[in-house]
Amino acid sequence: MSAALQQGLGYGLFVSLLLYVLKTTGNREKRYQCLLDNMTNKFNIVEDIKEDVKEIKNKIN
């Protein structure tokens, strides 16, 4: 009987730890997606500046 209770406790701890890890991983994934979106927007700004510089160089030459 006590062996069954010990195993049940171990399984319960395992399940609770698994759920905790899944929750924190989901939050981390959301933060990474937000970071990637911000970096993409900034990269687009740099690309726009690059095109503007090309236009200016063409007008000068």
Image (spheres, grey):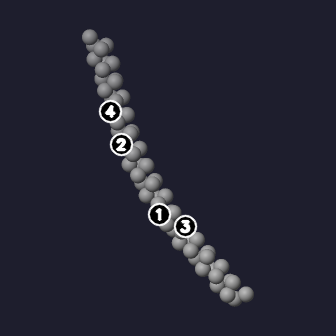
2 or 4: tag closer to the N-terminus: 4
Rounded to the nearest angstrom, the CA distance separating label 1 from label 2 is 23 Å
Rounded to the nearest angstrom, the CA distance separating label 3 from label 4 is 41 Å
3 or 4: tag closer to the N-terminus: 4
1 or 2: tag closer to the N-terminus: 2
Identify residue for label 1.
Answer: 38
3 or 2: tag closer to the N-terminus: 2
- Where is residue 60? Give x, y as percent: 69, 88
- For the point 67% across and 87% down, the residue is 59
Q: Quadrant of residue 47?
A: bottom right
1 or 4: tag closer to the N-terminus: 4
Rounded to the nearest angstrom, the CA distance separating label 2 from label 4 is 11 Å
Helix, strand or loop status at disc 1: helix
Q: Nearer the viewer, residue 37 or 4?
A: 37
Identify residue for label 3.
Answer: 43
Eye-nearest disc, 1 or 4: 1
Q: Nearer the viewer, residue 20 or 5?
A: 20
Q: Is residue 49 above or below residue 37?
A: below
- For the point 55% across and 67% down, the residue is 43
Helix, strand or loop status at disc 4: helix
1 or 3: tag closer to the N-terminus: 1
As drawn, the label of residue 23 is 2
Rounded to the nearest angstrom, the CA distance separating label 1 from label 3 is 9 Å
Disc 2: CA contacts within 10 A as few (<14), some (14-19) or many (>=20): few
Identify residue for label 4.
Answer: 16
Eye-nearest disc, 2 or 4: 2
Q: Is residue 49 above or below residue 5?
A: below
Q: Would you say 59 lies left or right of 34 here?
A: right
- Where is residue 19? Give x, y as percent: 34, 36
Eye-nearest disc, 3 or 2: 3
Q: Amino acid at mark 4?
A: Ser
